[in-house]
Amino acid sequence: MSPGHDGRGSDSRLLQSVAERDREAFEELYRRYARPVYGLALRRLGDRERAEEAVQETFASVWRSAESFDASRGAGASWVYAIARNSIVDRLRARRDTVAELPDTVAPEGGPDEAAEAGWIAWRVHRALEELPPAEREVLELAYWSGLSQSEVARFLNLPLGTVKTRTRSALGRLGRLLEREDLA
């Protein structure tokens, strides 16, 4: 049985139930995603204890913010993986923040102009993603925001690897064309 579709229903329905504080729905969501989230965290963090902390924080965040899930913006799995990615990144930053000395060189980040440009580009990409067909958007979200390989996306969505590659290629091409449009702003 693939994540997202079993006797309890879709991830979206489970998240709606979690938003209503349904503990059984939360437990089902945890059963579906704890192991893949742990694997992702372990691969990124390289430490079992910190990976377990990332899983705990992921599901605590899911419980706290399930009411913010919007099924029209993407799949429930993508939403859970985005939360997991944030938890993992927080753990990576915490490790980097323990540096005792300041570097002697100027940081490579740009000033306000570069930050504004980066924000503008991020906003345009987000807008363009919203225009993609859901199946294409889902593979991009899992690959680029959740950090899954194409093989992992294929296993997660219970799709042939060739289908995932085709959807990814199609989505990236469509995304590029959308970003070239002037009316996206």
Image: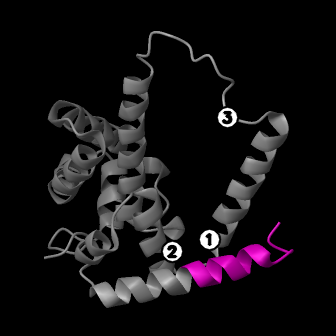
The correct choice, above or below, for 133 with respect to 43 in the image is below
Q: Name the residue under label 2.
A: 137
43 vs 97: above or below:
below
Determine the image quadrant of residue 77: bottom left
Compare residues 91 and 129 and report the one nearer the observer: 91
Position of residue 7 in the picture relative to residue 76 (left or right): left
Provide the residue designation for mark 1. 130
Q: Is mark 2 on a helix, strand or loop?
A: helix
Whether tag 1 and tag 2 are in contact, CB under 8 A, the answer is yes
Q: Is residue 105 above or below residue 183?
A: above
* Marks 1 and 2, the one that precedes in the sequence: 1
Q: Give the range drawn in magenta.
A: 172-185
- Apparent side of residue 159 relative to residue 108 in the rendered image (left or right): left
How would you rate the neighbour count of disc 3 (Cα within 10 Å): few for under 14, some for 14-19, many for 20 or more? Answer: few
Q: Is 73 in the magenta?
A: no
- For image coordinates 35% across by 45% down, the residue present is 62
Q: Earlier in the sequence, mark 2 or mark 3?
A: 3
Residue type highlighted by circle 3: Pro
Residue found 86% across the figure and 74% down from its top: 182
